[in-house]
Amino acid sequence: MDWLGLKARLLAMGNARLTGEGAEPYISASTAGPGAGSGGSIFFSTGRGRVRLALGEESPVEVEHRGGGRAVLRNGGLIVEGVLEPVALHCPRQAYITVTSGCIYRCRYCEVPEVAAGRKTVEQIEEMVAAIADRIDAISLTSGVLASVEEEEEYVTAVVRRLSRFGIPIGVSIFPREGTADRLYNLGVAEVKFNVEAATGDLFASMCPGLDWEMVWQELRRSVDLFGRGHVFSNLIIGLGEDDREVEECIGALCETGVIPVIRPLNPAGELSSYARPNADRLLRIYGIHARLLRKAGLDPGMSLTMCPACTGCDLVPGRDGPL
Ligand code: SF4
């Protein structure tokens, strides 16, 4: 099976049973990304790409760790040799840090509000990065919202100021307000990710009560002026109830703006635990749309430095998992 087909199938299933030798250094327990707050995940890689799989005892996918990171993935007669990648912080080769866990907002698909609220101090974060600085290519920061969007941005910018001494590209993904793009750019941040989350404004309003979709678009447009085309990203979740035409329109609008869409399959959680994950056929169909519209806009996720387009664990990424 080709890598793209295999990864689509694995993302549609979403998890794996880990067997074999002990695999502690290869297990990520995160408070960010799909599976936040769950029992951890692994990054299985072949020479063709990387996929993140949440750990689940009942999964039809088995990953057997044979020691030293060597691993074999088995699913329905399929056997694929690969490796488990060591996790730096949250994902391989990056310090991807959730500054504030927990959130005052209640986006319906998100598990973060269920995670106990907590905030790392600037000193803690600096120590975490210092401990692995020789093993990473990027620092990525994300955050829930502890008190308000304004206060969160101020806190995250204090973290950025402290981390700039490492000289490693920093990506930031927070909920933006008026002027967030300018402030992050002036601090020397390399890339930003502001998430449109849903394919339409109506769907966003029903999924993310109290948050402003137009503000996300405004700051995305401004970010492209500042950070440059291809260094601004936006998550678009697939499986919230949108159809493929709406997905295509949203991907098209992001690409025309110069923003790289991160096409994220829904992890049914939170209030949406009864929803279905998108199946592999739909993920591959949308991959085709995504690749075509990126190509048309002259955008290449393969050039990104930080955050999800540089990691690729949770999504099919044109230019990394397959040709553009
Ligand atoms: S793709 Fe993004 S959310 Fe997923 S593991 Fe990588 S950095 Fe985390």
Image (tube, rainbow, N blue to C red):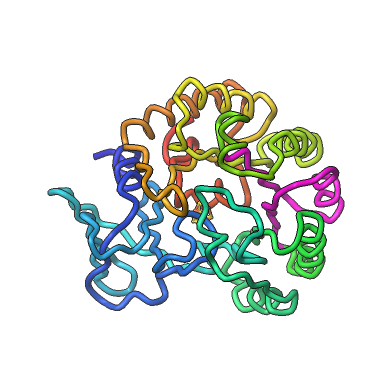
* Residue 204 figure quarter: top right
Label count reads 0
The answer to whether residue 133 is left or right of residue 114 is right
x and y percentages locating residue 63 in the rendered image: 25, 62
Q: Residue at x 57, y 69 (%)?
A: 135
x and y percentages locating residue 317 in the rendered image: 48, 40
Q: Residue at x 75, y 68 (%)?
A: 163
Q: Nearer the viewer, residue 310 or 122?
A: 122
Q: Is residue 308 above or below residue 98?
A: above
Q: Residue at x 59, y 62 (%)?
A: 96
Q: Is residue 48 above or below residue 204?
A: below
Q: Does residue 147 appear in this view?
A: yes
x and y percentages locating residue 316 in the rendered image: 43, 40
Highlighted magenta segment, given as a residue range: 168-197
Q: Is residue 144 above or below residue 299?
A: below
The answer to whether residue 98 is left or right of residue 61 is right
The answer to whether residue 36 is left or right of residue 4 is right
- Is 130 part of what is drawn in magenta? no
- Is 176 part of what is drawn in magenta? yes
Q: Residue at x 56, y 33 (%)?
A: 203
Q: Quadrant of the N terminus?
A: top left
